[in-house]
Amino acid sequence: MRTILLTFAMILRAGVADAWIGISLGEDGNNLPSRTEVVQKFKDIGVSHVRTYHTFSDTLGAFANSGIELTVGITNEDFPTQLASVDSAVAWANANIVPYGSSNIVAVTVGNEVFSSTSDSVISQLLPSMQNLRQALDQLGKNSIMVTTAHSFDVVTNTFPPSSGTFGDTSRMQPIVSWLSSTGSFFIANIYPYFAYVGSGGQISLQYGRLESGSVTDTGNGKIYTNLLAQQLDAVYAALAKLGFPDLLVRVGEIGWPSAGGTDATVQNAQIHNQNVVNLVPGGTPVKPMQIDAYIFAMFNENQRPAGIEQNWGLYNPVGFQPVYTINWS
C-alpha cells in the first residue's frame, strides 16, 4: 500500500503546474495575535501554505478546516529523544499529528538546520529519527504526510558558479538525500540572498541581491542568472545532482530580507526583495524552469528573538496586524 500511495503522490506532484508562495509562522514573541486571527489573516491575503516550527496545540487547532496546507516541525532539541524509536515516534505523532486531522498537515520537518547548528551526535540521529517518524505515520494511517528536514544553504559549498555546487558533508548527506527520494519526499533549503549579499564584500550588487536585475553567467554550463535566488537554488540542485538525485524537488523553507537592524536592512529593500520572491516563483531557475515552492520568513516581527535583524524579518508588526510593508500576493 505504501508503494501505491508513494507512486500516486509522485504522479500528483509531477502534474502540479501552479506555483505557490507560503509564509513561515515563527512564534517567538509575547505580543502575537491570537492564532485564530492569524489564520484568518492568511486566508484574507490568499496564502494557502504555512510552515510552523512547532506543534503547539492552539496553533494547529486554529488551522482546522481552513484549507491551508501546513508543514509543521519538531525542534532540534526534541527530535533525538521523541523520535528515538518507532514506538516513541508513534507516541509523538499520536499527541501532535493525529488529533489535528482537520488541519491539513502535509509535511513534518525533523529539525531545522541540523547540520549547521547542532553537534555531531545530533546530526547522526537525524536520519534514524526521520525513518522512525515515517514508520510511525504509516502505522497510524498518515501515509500522505511527508517527512523531511530543513537545511541551511551553508551545507552547500563551491556555490559559484552554481554548477559547481556540492555538499560539504557528502558522507552524511548522501543517505539522507537517498532516503528522501525513496520515500517521495523533498529537500528543504533555507536560502537567504540577504546574507550572501552582505557577506560578499561588494561583489554582489544590491539590485542582484534584491532579485531585481543582473546578468551573471555560469562558466560551467553557460546558464545566465538575473537574480541571486535562482543562482543559489541551482547550486543546491547541482549538489543534489552530484549525489545522483538531479530530480529531487527542492523547496525553499525560508527566504526573506530584514527591514531593520543591519546593513541595508530597510523597509524599502525588504519590500522589493520579498515582492520579487513572489514574482519569481512561477518562473523557476535556468536549470529548473519550473515553479519554485517557497516560504517567506516570516509572518511577524518577533520580539523574543535576538536583538537586531533577527527581530525584523516580519511582514507584519504583531500589534494590530500593522504591515511593515505591502506585498501583492497575486
Image (tube, rainbow, N blue to C red):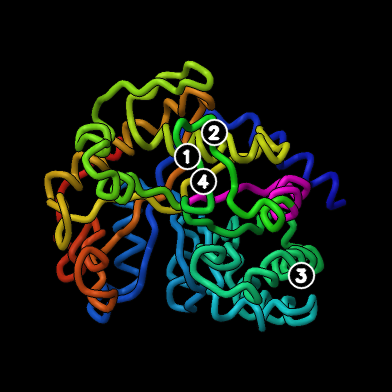
| Res 164 label | 2
The residue type indicated by label 3 comes to Asn
SS at mark 3 in the image: helix
Give the x, y percent position of residue 42. 34, 55
Marks 3 and 4, how far apart at CA: 30 Å
Give the x, y percent position of residue 127. 71, 64
Disc 1 residue crowd, few under 14, some 14–19, many 20+, Cα 10 Å:
many
Whether residues under marks 2 and 1 lie with C-beta atoms below 8 angstroms apart, the answer is: yes
Label 1 sits on residue: 159
The residue type indicated by label 4 comes to Thr
Residue at x-position 35% and y-position 23%: 216
Label 3 sits on residue: 132
Q: Give the range drawn in magenta.
A: 175-189
Q: Which of marks 2 and 1 is nearer the N terminus?
A: 1
| Res 157 label | 4
Whether 67 is drawn above or below 123: the answer is: above
Q: Which of marks 1 and 3 is nearer the N terminus?
A: 3
SS at mark 2 in the image: helix
Tell us which disc is closer to us: 3 or 4.
4
The residue type indicated by label 1 comes to Thr
The residue type indicated by label 2 comes to Ser
Marks 1 and 4, how far apart at CA: 5 Å
Marks 3 and 2, how far apart at CA: 34 Å
Tell whether position 106 is magenta: no
Between residue 131 and residue 113, name the one nearer to us. 113
Give the x, y percent position of residue 252. 47, 47
Residue at x-position 38% and y-position 37%: 229
Marks 2 and 1, how far apart at CA: 6 Å
Left/right placement of residue 129 relative to residue 116 reads right
